[in-house]
């Protein structure tokens, strides 16, 4: 079977994100179109929402899924979000958690400094601009008179899927990620 792949503006449509739902319609993960199509053809999943684009073979046209649902129940992984710099920036929306600056060069700051026993945890690490990070130094927030815009916490699976999905995909995924 010869296939013609529809191309989008940013390259192959096969690398576009697809939301994967559990049998009970719980959001599980994100995969690419290539993986989603394989799961559908192997009858391990079914399409729930389509992108509006098609994959063509010589005789058939197949709608490309934006959301698929697996046929058997899979337990969601609880600690799916890895603690790293990239994910802290994503969690904090690339915004300084002290002054709210968005268009500055950012770094990671320990709320409770390491020299005072602060650990590398989701609750102790925030995104900060260089000015705020230097102002705070190795002091506690109360000592320097600074406050956080919001209390940091570990993102769960739903937060990860919401934040890390592309904007185009989010619109079709909204009902499944509890945006509405």
Image (cartoon, rainbow, N blue to C red):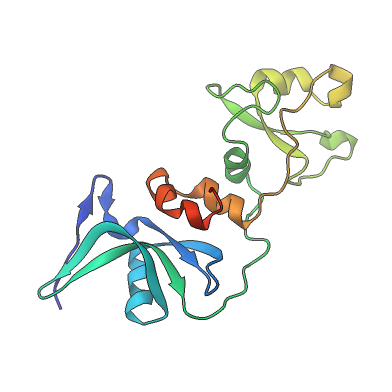
Placement of 106 over or under 90, stated as above or below:
above
On the rendered image, what quadrant is the N terminus found in? bottom left
Q: Position of residue 35 (x, y in %)?
A: 38, 69
Given residues 72 and 15, the one toward you in this image is 72
Q: Position of residue 46 (x, y in %)?
A: 39, 74
Placement of 78 over or under 153, stated as above or below:
below
Given residues 90 and 135, the one toward you in this image is 90
Seen at 52% across and 81% down, the residue is 72
Quarter-of-image position of residue 55: bottom left
User: Seen in the image, is 12 located left or right of residue 114?
Assistant: left
Quarter-of-image position of residue 98: top right
Placement of 41 over or under 80, stated as above or below:
below
Q: Position of residue 115 (x, y in %)?
A: 86, 34
Quarter-of-image position of residue 65: bottom left
Q: Position of residue 86 (x, y in %)?
A: 57, 43
Placement of 18 over or under 3, stated as above or below:
above
Seen at 19% across and 57% down, the residue is 6
């Amino acid at each position: 079977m010869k296939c013609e792949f529809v191309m989008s503006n940013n390259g192959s449509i096969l690398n576009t994100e697809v939301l994967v739902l559990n049998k009970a319609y719980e959001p599980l993960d994100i995969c690419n179109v290539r993986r989603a199509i394989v799961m559908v053809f192997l009858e391990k999943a079914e399409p729930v929402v389509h992108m509006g684009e098609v994959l063509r073979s010589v005789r058939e046209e197949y709608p490309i899924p934006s959301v698929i649902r697996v046929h058997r129940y899979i337990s969601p992984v609880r600690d799916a979000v890895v603690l790293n710099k990239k994910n802290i920036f994503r969690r904090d929306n690339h915004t300084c958690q002290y002054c709210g600056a968005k268009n500055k060069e950012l770094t990671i700051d320990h709320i409770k400094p390491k020299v005072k026993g602060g650990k590398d945890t989701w609750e102790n690490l925030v995104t900060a601009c260089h000015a705020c990070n230097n102002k705070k130094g190795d002091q506690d927030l109360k000592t320097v008179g600074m406050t956080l815009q919001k209390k940091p916490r570990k993102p769960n699976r739903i937060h990860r899927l919401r934040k890390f999905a592309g904007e185009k995909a989010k619109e079709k995924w909204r009902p499944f990620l509890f945006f509405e």
